[in-house]
């Protein structure tokens, strides 16, 4: 297994309340020329979690920060007008906390962050550093 030191959270940048499948995200990423979906886990609106890219494989989620990291994404992150908004449902927040705890235990993570800490983007549309998931390590 490759060494993983950090989890980086993302959003799908889709409107609040609109579900998006792993297959659709995979298609978007392949259309960009990537080999597969860039994220390792996808958290759906109801809190269910689906695997994306295998965690043993380097992701394609944060330019310049894919080696040594895993990338998880929640569905949402925009309001109806496509402005950034923390649209996480209670079920998503609960699942995100559980996933983050699992990843910390599995990999001995040293850091949990948001995509917006590495790029001039709103993604994941909230500040991970001020969120419970960012304060578990």
Image: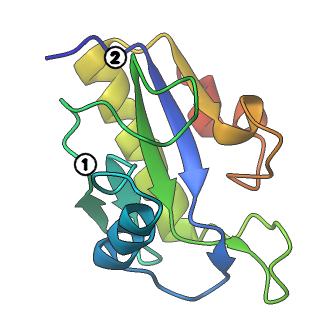
With respect to residue 80, does 62 lie above or below? above
The reply, left or right, for residue 23 in relation to residue 117 is: left
What residue appears at the point 33 percent right and 29 percent down from the top-left corner?
103
Residue 124 position within the rendered picture, expressed as x and y whole percent measured from the top left: 68, 52
Residue 72 position within the rendered picture, expressed as x and y whole percent measured from the top left: 44, 46
**Local SS, label 2:** loop
Mark 1 lies on residue: 53
Residue 73 position within the rendered picture, expressed as x and y whole percent measured from the top left: 48, 54
Residue that protrudes farthest toward the left in the picture: 1
Task: Single out the mark in the foreground, 2 or 1.
Answer: 1
The reply, left or right, for residue 74 in relation to residue 86 is: left
The reply, left or right, for residue 114 in relation to residue 2 is: right
The reply, left or right, for residue 69 in relation to residue 35 is: right
**Local SS, label 1:** loop
Residue 5 position within the rendered picture, expressed as x and y whole percent measured from the top left: 41, 13
CA separation in Å, label 2 and label 1: 15 Å
Which residue is more in the foreground, 57 or 41?
A: 57
């Amino acid at each position: 297994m490759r060494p993983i030191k950090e989890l980086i959270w993302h959003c799908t940048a889709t409107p609040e309340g609109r579900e998006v499948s792993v297959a659709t995200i995979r298609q978007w990423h392949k259309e960009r020329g990537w080999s597969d979906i860039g994220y390792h886990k996808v958290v759906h609106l109801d809190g269910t979690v689906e695997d994306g890219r295998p965690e043993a494989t380097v992701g394609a989620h944060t330019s310049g920060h894919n080696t040594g990291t895993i990338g998880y994404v929640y569905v949402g992150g925009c309001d109806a007008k496509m402005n950034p908004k923390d649209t996480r449902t209670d079920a998503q927040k609960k699942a995100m906390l559980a996933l983050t705890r699992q990843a910390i235990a599995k990999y001995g993570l040293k850091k949990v962050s948001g995509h917006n800490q590495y790029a001039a983007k709103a993604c994941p549309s909230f500040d991970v550093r001020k969120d419970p998931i960012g304060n578990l390590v």
